[in-house]
């Protein structure tokens, strides 16, 4: 996504795809229109939340009972995030009214909550002995890679849009 008046390339929400594109010296405009950057983390967040709630039950279910429980937990994870995002929006409004938050955009503040809670869930999953442990470890590794990429990009000047 390019801003019409800006000569600076924007569009990636996460730092890791920006760094990989910078390393490959490619044009990010081809991949910025795809929903992979949005859908993949969204699915991972819902999966981590689902596995966390499923791990909390600690009750073996098999067959159709497991399917019904899984369906209910998936819906419960979705409702959990709706409630969490609503409560976070109230906190953001109160923080803005109290002039605690001034420069952080709302979507970034929401992302801090989402990423923070999901990382706590993933950390909890990584401590278990179940197969869900690997999902938690994968999330923690992805977060570490993304933060490392953000740190590396902080020391590199921004890309300029090339006229084509």
Image (cartoon, rainbow, N blue to C red):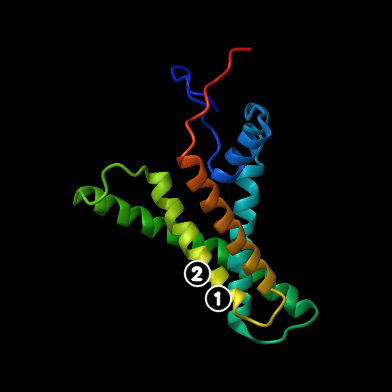
Instruction: Identify the residue under disc 1.
Output: 124
Callout 2: SS: helix
Residue 149 drawn above or below residue 33? below
- In front: 28, or 57? 28
The alpha-carbon separation of the residues under discs 1 and 2 comes to: 6 Å
Instruction: Identify the residue under disc 2.
Output: 120
Q: Residue at x 68, y 34 (%)?
A: 24
Q: Residue at x 63, y 68 (%)?
A: 137
Is residue 88 rendered to the left or right of residue 71? left
Residue 127, given in percent of the width and then of the height, sits at: 59, 79
Do the residues under discs 1 and 2 have CB atoms within 8 angstroms?
yes
Residue 163, given in percent of the width and then of the height, sits at: 59, 13
Is residue 144 rendered to the left or right of residue 33? left
Q: Residues within 10 Å of mark 1 (few under 14, many from 20)?
A: some
Is residue 159 rendered to the left or right of residue 135? left
- In front: 25, or 34? 25
Callout 1: SS: helix
Q: Quadrant of residue 136?
A: bottom right
Q: Quadrant of residue 131?
A: bottom right
């Amino acid at each position: 996504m390019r801003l019409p008046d800006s000569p600076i390339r924007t569009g990636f929400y996460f730092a890791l795809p920006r760094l990989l594109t910078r390393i490959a010296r490619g044009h990010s405009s081809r991949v910025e229109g795809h929903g992979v950057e949005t859908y993949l983390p969204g699915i991972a967040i819902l999966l981590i939340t689902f596995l966390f709630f499923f791990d909390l039950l600690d009750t073996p279910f098999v067959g159709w009972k497991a399917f019904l429980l899984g369906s209910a937990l998936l819906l419960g994870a979705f409702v959990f995030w709706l409630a969490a995002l609503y409560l976070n929006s109230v906190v953001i409004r109160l923080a803005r009214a109290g002039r605690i938050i001034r420069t952080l955009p709302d979507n970034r503040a929401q992302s801090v909550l989402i990423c923070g809670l999901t990382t706590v869930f993933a950390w909890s999953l990584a401590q278990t002995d179940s197969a869900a442990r690997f999902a938690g470890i994968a999330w923690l590794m992805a977060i570490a890679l993304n933060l490392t990429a953000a740190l590396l990009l902080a020391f590199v000047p921004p890309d300029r849009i090339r006229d084509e």
